[in-house]
Amino acid sequence: MRSFSPTELIALVIVWLGASGVVLAAYQVTDKINMTIVAVGALVAAYLLSKWLITKESD
């Protein structure tokens, strides 16, 4: 596993905080089906973005 630059670590934290915020906001919505789709989508997007940041070749 390669080492991370501070910028990459900050980016990962922001991605996951953003996803958490979207999930929490989705739970305020009354329509449970849409809320579930949004929450799962946000978590999947955060996972994929994290995976991309981690596997991305360093310059």
Image (tube, rainbow, N blue to C red):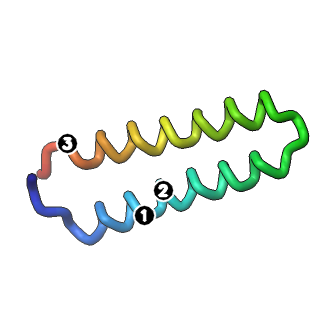
**Mark 3 Cα-neighbour bin, 10 Å: few <14, some 14–19, many ≥20:** few
Badge 3 element: helix
What type is the residue that disc 1 sits on? Answer: Val
Residue lying furthest front: 32
Write down the residue under mark 3.
55
Real-space Cα distance between discs 2 and 3?
A: 17 Å
Do the numbered discs 2 and 3 sit on residues whose CB atoms are within 8 Å? Answer: no
* Image position of 56 with respect to 8: above or below: above
- Along the line of sight, the residue nearer the viewer: 13 or 36: 36
Image location (x, y in percent) of residue 9 = 31, 65
Going 9% across and 55% down the picture, which residue do you hit?
Answer: 2
Image location (x, y in percent) of residue 54 = 23, 48
Do the numbered discs 1 and 3 sit on residues whose CB atoms are within 8 Å? Answer: no
What type is the residue that disc 2 sits on? Answer: Trp
Real-space Cα distance between discs 1 and 3?
A: 16 Å
Image disc number at residue 13? 1
* Image position of 36 with respect to 16: above or below: above
Instruction: Give the side of residue 44 with respect to residue 29, left or right.
Output: left
What type is the residue that disc 3 sits on? Answer: Thr
Instruction: Give the side of residue 49 with respect to residue 43, left or right.
Output: left
